[in-house]
Amino acid sequence: MYNKGFIMSKVIENALIKINKKLRDNIFEDALKIEILEEGFIVVTQDGAFSEPFDVNCTMTSDLKTFEGILAGTIKASGAFMSGKLKIEGDISTAINFAKKLNSQ
């Protein structure tokens, strides 16, 4: 549940829509948090993408430009990680699996 007065960034709101659409027929069977610097966070589980606290085993962090490029498919997550534009904490196989699910659509 969202707290009263919680205002979600338009970036987060649009990303939730895009991620849920991409994962509609391709369920992600783990729990991952995406932190977008200066915007907020998204949690992705087998129930879809949302922006509420949840226990995860992997956190991906990037700036807005990198995140939008990954989501649009113009930036490969592996390249962003290797260049330091995407940071991953926790189980890296979860991040790899998520990237594959996003790119499979």
Image (spheres, helix red, strand yellow):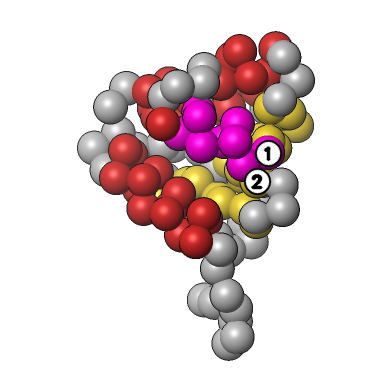
Quarter holding the C terminus is top left
Q: In which image quadrant can residue 54 be found?
A: bottom right
Q: Amino acid at mark 1?
A: Asp
Please report the residue visible at 57 percent of the width from the left and 28 percent of the height from the top. 94
Which of marks 2 and 1 precedes in the sequence?
2
Q: Amino acid at mark 2?
A: Ile
Residue 41 drawn at (x, y percent):
62, 53
Residues 92 and 14: in front is: 14
Circle 2: element type = strand
Residue 64 drawn at (x, y percent):
62, 41
Residue 96 drawn at (x, y percent):
54, 21
Which label was assigned to residue 7?
none
Residue 75, compared with residue 69, is above or below; it is above
Which residue was labeled with disc 1?
63
Query: Residue lying farthest left?
Result: 25
The magenta segment is 63-71
